Image (cartoon, rainbow, N blue to C red):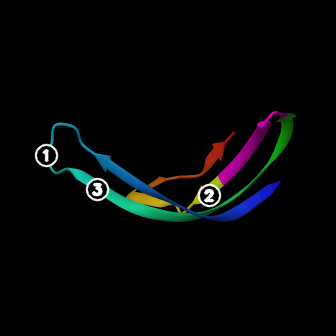
């Protein structure tokens, strides 16, 4: 099977030991992937899936960006 769609992630960061030094945002993106699944019998299946998610680039400060893509198996 194949899959494609919209995805989003909540991202937050903080500085330990400094109360209130925390920032957060939600980033949008898209995903594509695919997989295989096989019936083993008696209600059991065996499967594998790969998913690639590409999110918007997150800018932490001027000149400091975070690449937020993900590979999942």
Mark 1: give few (<14), some (14-19) or many (20+) Cα within 10 Å: few
Magenta residue check for 40:
no
- Which residues, given as a range, are shown in magenta? 41-52
**Does residue 18 show up?**
yes
| Position above or below: 55 against 47 | below
Q: Residue placed farthest to the left in the image?
A: 19
Residue at x 85% of width, y 34% of height: 41
The part of the image, by quadrant, that contains residue 11 is bottom left
Q: State left or right for residue 13 relative to residue 32.
A: left
Contact (CB < 8 A) between labels 1 and 2?
no
Residue position marked by numbered label 1 in the rendering: 19
- Give percent across and percent down for residue 3: 75, 59
Mark 3: give few (<14), some (14-19) or many (20+) Cα within 10 Å: few
How far apart in space, not on screen, are marks 3 and 1 (Cα)?
12 Å
Residue position marked by numbered label 2 in the rendering: 54
Quarter of the rendering occupied by the N terminus: bottom right
Residue at x 32% of width, y 48% of height: 13
Quarter of the rendering occupied by the C terminus: top right
Residue position marked by numbered label 3 in the rendering: 23
SS type, badge 1: loop
**Does residue 62 show up?**
no
- Give percent across and percent down for residue 24: 33, 57
Q: Earlier in the sequence, mark 3 or mark 2?
A: 3
Q: State left or right for residue 7 relative to residue 15.
A: right
How far apart in space, not on screen, are marks 3 and 2 (Cα)?
21 Å
């Amino acid at each position: 099977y194949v899959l494609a769609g919209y995805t989003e992630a909540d991202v937050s960061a903080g500085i330990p030991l400094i109360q209130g030094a925390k920032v957060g945002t939600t980033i949008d993106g898209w995903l594509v992937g695919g997989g295989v699944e096989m019936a083993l019998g008696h209600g059991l299946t065996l499967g594998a899936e790969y998913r690639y998610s590409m999110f918007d680039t997150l800018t932490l400060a001027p000149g400091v960006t975070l690449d937020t893509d993900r590979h999942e198996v």
